[in-house]
Amino acid sequence: MAKVLKASEMKKCIGCFTCMNICSIVNRQNHSLSKSAIKVRTSGGMAGRFVAIVCLACDDPACMEACPSGALTKRKGGGVLLNAEKCIGCHRCESACITQSVFWDDEENKPIICRHCGSCARFCPHKCLNIEEVADV
Amino acid sequence: MINEKYIRVLYIDMASKKIRVEQRADLMPYLGGVGVATKLLDENMHPELDPLHPDQPIIFSIGAGTWVFPVLTKTVAMFVSPLTGELGESYAGGRLAMCLLLAGYDAVVISGKSEKPAGLRISNNNVEFVDNRAIWGLDSEATGSAIRERSVGGGKRSIIRIGPAGENKVAFASVCVDSFRHFGRLGLGAVMGSKNLKAVMVLGDRSIHIQNTKEYFKVYQSIYKKCTSTDMMAKYHDDGTPAGVLPLNASNSLPTLNLSTTNFEHAEAISGDTFAKKNLVRKVACTGCPVGCIHIGMFRREFDKGHEYEAISVPYDYELIFALGSFLGVKSSDEIIHLIDEVEETGVDAISAGVCLGWATEALEKGLINEEQTIVKLEWGNTENYLKAIRYLALAKNKFYRDLGRGSKYASSVYGGADFAMQFGGNEMPGYHTGYASVVGFSVAARHSHLDNGGYAIDQGLKQFEEEAVVDKIFFEEHDRCMTNSLGMCLFARKVYDHQTILDALNSIGHNLTDQDLVDIGKRTLRLKMQVKEKLGFSLKALRLPKRFFETTTMHGKVDEETVYRMINTYGDKIKDMMKEPDPLLDPVHKTAPVKVAKVAVKAE
């Protein structure tokens, strides 16, 4: 069974941003929030509720379809895998994602693609983020 | 600066609208946070000038481990306090520390006065001076949303701002940080107001590569585990700090009705449990804290007839419940939330506002002041009138409120009633009348805050009272917290961050420190604080406390006046000894001295 990340319990979110920190540390060896493949933000300032913007693991990914150089390939369980060597930095995957879950690394000029590795979920103190098992599509 | 051997300081002059950046290796012995801020305050302050003179500086400083380790969330602000005239030091959480780190500044020094109301936008590649004339006069929340809605970068920005109280230079005006946190105590809001500085936005977006991910992440995980899987911090998330209301009340330590008593008959109605059941709607965290102690309470206010309601939601904490609740005889959680909202909107420190109004209520009762001066009748439990009084304070409505806005010590020097103006060194008392360690601790504390040395906690854990031992404990906490506050740590995590954990953390991100270094950093900072206080005219010997502290019972019975002053003197002697201690890093002349002594000792054997 393949695994995908689901931000299914965001009502419990306290806005600590640990998920973003962990994603940057584990996947990018960096402390910057902007390296993270998951973004938690408030809608309407600190008084608003927290929402998570993260890859929804599409079965038929628009980002992959938009990629002209074959840098994105389909991932088992949903979503895509990035082959950075093949990426030309055209931003088309970024614009193709209607949930705006493809972020951009300005330093590397490459997209930031969620690997569904589950590190963020493992460190989510209130279990807002969870790893779920899905069929290998 | 993380990964570097210097502290990066941004200097901003509001008058000339010029900035400069310095990378200072010489600040490394102060580590970060309060250590660095104290040094920058000492360098930039002008003891001969009024605290609100344009030349006086505001210092912001983040810690040596800010954001990269859990719960290291605090930014310290230092300034010359308009309330006490001496050391001004205040801490806030929220997003500010992380944003400063990601913007690339360890510390910011703001001086000068803008000709017209202005704001600042600080980011990694720019510092902008923004026209804030249109929002001058707005309440805190309206100011926040006006700025928020007109700028990009949600999630990576922090907005700090003052309300009308800061603009009108109320001596205990606060600064609101990201809606839910504050630089509350000692009047930073007034200092910002005196510079015509309404708000500061910080945006941080830079990349910081981790040098040794394996070692660092190992330490990160063990700290994270302590924060989330042990009971070290659990209480702060559950009922939060208001859990203290009932135990403090039951042990005769809850300041009530201007400290005429320490037992509040309506304590149940304002307990942590009552707030949780009636008002709690949400818990949130400062950025980088997996605990989440911020409790948001809501109440429904009918603002007009015909079922016209609005929902008011504010963060509530123990200190606010004491200051605006038991201290003023306010006996419901709804009313306290309403008062907190007014304190938030006008931008005053909740503790000082509550304690000042407590004094004013009693002064009116005793006929020292009259209703013409107070405009509304101040009486215990009259929330409606207290709401108006808070607004009058913030607006400096008449001479009386202007005087009260300079603090209870000043107001009582004008109108009388100094024996029941409940302040330590000019700073209004916190919500603990627990015994000798609280009274002595708050008196000798560098900024007269309960968080300098946690005297109340010493009382609470005391098995047997022994004068010298209590003073020793206060002294240890005072210098040890100077070190932890250089880390940028939230004090709620003090059990998590023991010395070994601090060493593991800092050494995994490029420091090379020993336990002795940590002690030295704390004492170095405290010594400098004492020098700053002396330059600003403070004398521990001259400190006098209002009589009521000795008349109202604590959990350990009444405290004896003579004993308190004797303990303060003992503490003063300890400080004197510490001032003479050599500093291994800063004082090369002294560096060899202890070695020589050691050699002599060996020979003597």
Image: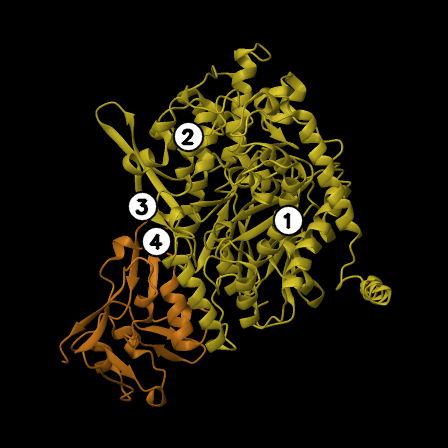
In this rendering, the answer to whether B474 lies above or below B366 is below
Q: State whether residue B394 appears in this view.
A: no
Q: Kindly identify which residue carries mark 2.
A: B339
The residue under label 4 is A14
Q: Quadrant of the C terminus of chain B?
A: bottom right
Left or right: B181 with respect to B45? left
Looking at numbered disc 3 in the image, what kind of residue is underneath it?
Answer: Arg
Crowding near the residue tagged with mark 4, few <14, some 14–19, many ≥20 C-alpha atoms within 10 Å: many
Relative image position of residue A106 (x, y in whole percent): 43, 76
Residue position marked by numbered label 3 in the rendering: B282
Foreground tag (2 vs 4): 4
Q: CA distance from mark 1 to mark 4?
A: 34 Å
Q: Which residue is mark 1?
A: B476
> Residue B324 in the image: x percent, y percent?
45, 29
| Rendering coords of residue A10 (x, y %) | 26, 57
- Comparing B319 with B171, the one in front is B319
Closer to us: A8 or B504:
B504
Ranked by sequence position, the earlier of labels 2 and 3 is 3
Are labels 2 and 4 assigned to the same chain? Answer: no
Q: Residue at x 26, y 71 (%)?
A: A55
Look at the image and give the colour of chain A: orange
